[in-house]
Image (tube, rainbow, N blue to C red):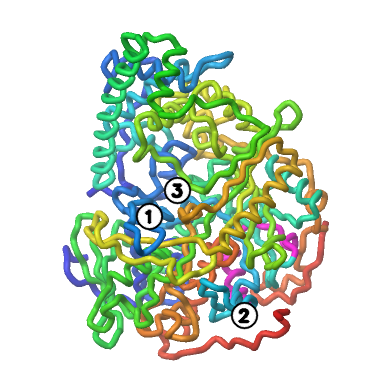
Amino acid sequence: MISKSEWEIVPLTIDPDSSKKLFFTDHEWETIEAAAARIIPTDNDPGAKEARVIVFIDRYLSGIDYVYAAADGSGFLRMSGRDATAARASNEIFKAMYREGVKDLDQLAGDFGSKNFKDSPAETQDRILEKLSGRPKPEPIRFDIHEVYYSRLQGNTDQDKTFFDTLCLHVRQGFYSDPVYGGNKDQIGWKVIGFPGPKSLKDTIDGTYTTDPYFVHDVSWPELLLDFKGVAVCKVSCATEGGVCCGELEVES
Amino acid sequence: MNKSGTLDAVDVVIVGLGAGGGPAAKVLSEAGYTVVGFDKGPWLRHEEHYSGDELKFQNRSYLWPDVKLMPRTVRSDVNSKARIFNFSPVPSNVGGGTSHMAGWTPRPRPSDFIFRSLHGDLHGASLADWPYRYEHLEPYLTKVEWEYGISGLTGAEKGAGFRSKPYPSAPLPPTRFGKAFYDACKKLDINAFPLPMSHITKDNALGREAINRTSFWNQYGDPTATRSSVATTFIPDAIKTGNFEVRANSFVKEVIVDDQGIAKGVIYVDDDGIEFRQEARVVILALGAIESARLMLLSKSRRFPDGLANDSGLVGKNATFHEYIFAVGLFDKDFTDPLYGFTGNYQSGGSMEFYETDENRGHIGGGIIATTQIGQPINMIMPGKPSWGQAAKDSDRNFFNYSMKIGFILQDMPQESNRVDLDPDVKDMWGLPVARITNKPHINDTAMSRWQINKNVEILEAAGAIRTMPVYLGDEFTGNSCHQQGSVRMGVDPRKSVLNEWGQAHSAENVFVLDGAGFPTAMGVNPTLTIMAHSWRCSDYIAKVYLKGRTEKTVLEPLKNLGRK
């Protein structure tokens, strides 16, 4: 078995402008693209459509070739062993879920008097998604209410979710993940929210990309902290010589 | 190595190469003993496998354990059926949790080691003192800070325990949300300080290069080794001795024990499914408190029919999990400078102002708080965030750079009923019963959660938040901090504990459990630094005392002036 540490890099790249479909049929592609455009709509700023979220989702659903980008973004990892088996099993579940999901969207469109989802007016599409989700369409954040929440796990996998919740998560991932995965074209998603992300994954591994300018550099610790007057320094250097410190630390501001 | 069968005996086997196994590998191989270290996961290399790829590391489980392959189950009481849940997930690879953790590495306080002496009995809980004290661990805390690489601002934490040496590396400068936290704490007369972290900064005393300032940090592997990880420090140190061998992708399924209760070694399965027997003079378990307890329960023998060294019946019991809870504040972008919640190596300012017991708060104990990242775009943390439509887009756009979070490590009280045992139905990919976690918060946990998160809300308001969102502990723990303690308790009395003060099993003298499993109480700080120092101390004992055929006891001076009524 090939260990995860030995997975080969396959030099695959994804063209965000591609209209070639690896998984979806034409109808499914257009339906999911239309739904994504309601999940992250286009306004003064671009939305899921311009970010090519549809390409991101199609490539992900196509199999297990586009699950993990190589660390430097030069391709994708060829999964192997138990991980590959588990990923293939998940992929089959997603494929069936999306196939059924598109049918459900069209069927719900029928209930609203439309022939299908993708050609329904935006307002109707929102009603259909609302119905599919089983919850009202989310309202803007309010400042005059107090709600409490309870803790949950870190990380955010797409396992064991409904079609609607999976779709929302995949659209979000396609809008904001590194462009190497086919979405977030030209870092459109990042620009919308003001995230100064790296130019490439490679820049994150070799020190090229830094967020240093976003730290605060013009304030000293004694100014900032209540009880701190300066750095405690061992004046006797006893401990650094390998001994036990005599505890005579002096403060140096 | 043979194709299968029995391998040449070594002095020591270590199962699990994370925070507990790493220091043991270093200390014992440097002392001249032959050591084999097992990890069920791969040996990933930072320069080859890690990057700032949010999707890969946070959403697609490149490092997170896949619950389909290595499930756990959870239930809230013994009468309920457990459900599959990725409870307290920790990366399964060489380095373990240290490969991707945010890296809070504050020191414990002297009070953590004498929790029962300070508080007496607490109804429904099983409080206990540790079989050693802060002063016994202090030299090892210092060793870890210097050999592993921890940054901090010496002298800034009010009420800290004695330290024999300053930090070897200065902290990172504050993030913008960190500064907002410091300013608010100052306003409220709260002692705050840059949280000690397992990373190093420029011009550190260790001569290590500090490169990573990408802010891709919590849950990511660090491609530069700026973050101190067991895989980039202790493991290479051990390999340098020529006495240490890593066996990655090797799953240990049983500790073999003879009729006298002496461990003979372990049985493990390699990546191709071939089974081997590795004999050793000493067996060290450091799989993390959940999996260490599970392996002990799986290792049934004539001498130990209820699981390895389980004469007391306590293996798996009294587990604690440190739920991570927090409050988020939203700020008005028209009146505030951006807070850039994606920046920093996750955490910035912290405080232990509310660490020691103050009974006016309505609970005993406390924990550390710190202001931490909102996260990168996909996984931006905003409780109740709209999931789709214009409201979703607006909330991302308005608050991605204008919100902040203050988190809290909840010190849960040990309870015998909060436990790890073997699930009767669910098996992992090796066909063995998985760990089943039974847990319900103690009333003190719930009270602590309420009080502290409300305090965090107050700090956010002092920082200028226009809306706050408290996230409390619910009816069950989720294990979301990935901290695990207590399941194989240390103590002085073999009827009330499984291990002694050296992490050594009372009834199986060559078995040592050197992760957080031994910790009788959870402490209010993140356990990694303490786990490493504890493992170092116990490994020193194995090398210098136990393997020389001697024994030694830790002397506990009578406690004075505890101020109890």
Report in which chain the residue with disc 3 lies. Answer: B
SS at badge 1: loop
Report the span colored magenta: B134-158
Q: Where does residue B259 sit, x and y in percent of width and height?
A: 24, 86
Quadrant where the C terminus of chain A sits is bottom right
Mark 3: few/some/many CA within 10 Å (<14, 14-19, 20+) = some
* Residue drawn where x is 44% and y is 36% of the image: B55
Q: Are marks 3 and 1 on the same chain?
A: yes
Quadrant housing residue B313: bottom left
User: Residue under circle 1?
Assistant: B92
Question: Residue tagged by mark 2?
Answer: B117
Labelled disc at residue B130: none
* Amino acid at circle 1: Ser
**Mark on residue B46?**
3
In terms of depth relative to the viewer, which is nearer, B28 or A142?
A142
Residues tagged 2 and 3 counted as in contact (Cβ below 8 A)? no
Judge left or right: residue B174 versus residue A125. right
Q: Nearer the viewer, residue B544 or B84?
A: B84
Which comes sooner in the sequence, label 3 or label 1? Answer: 3
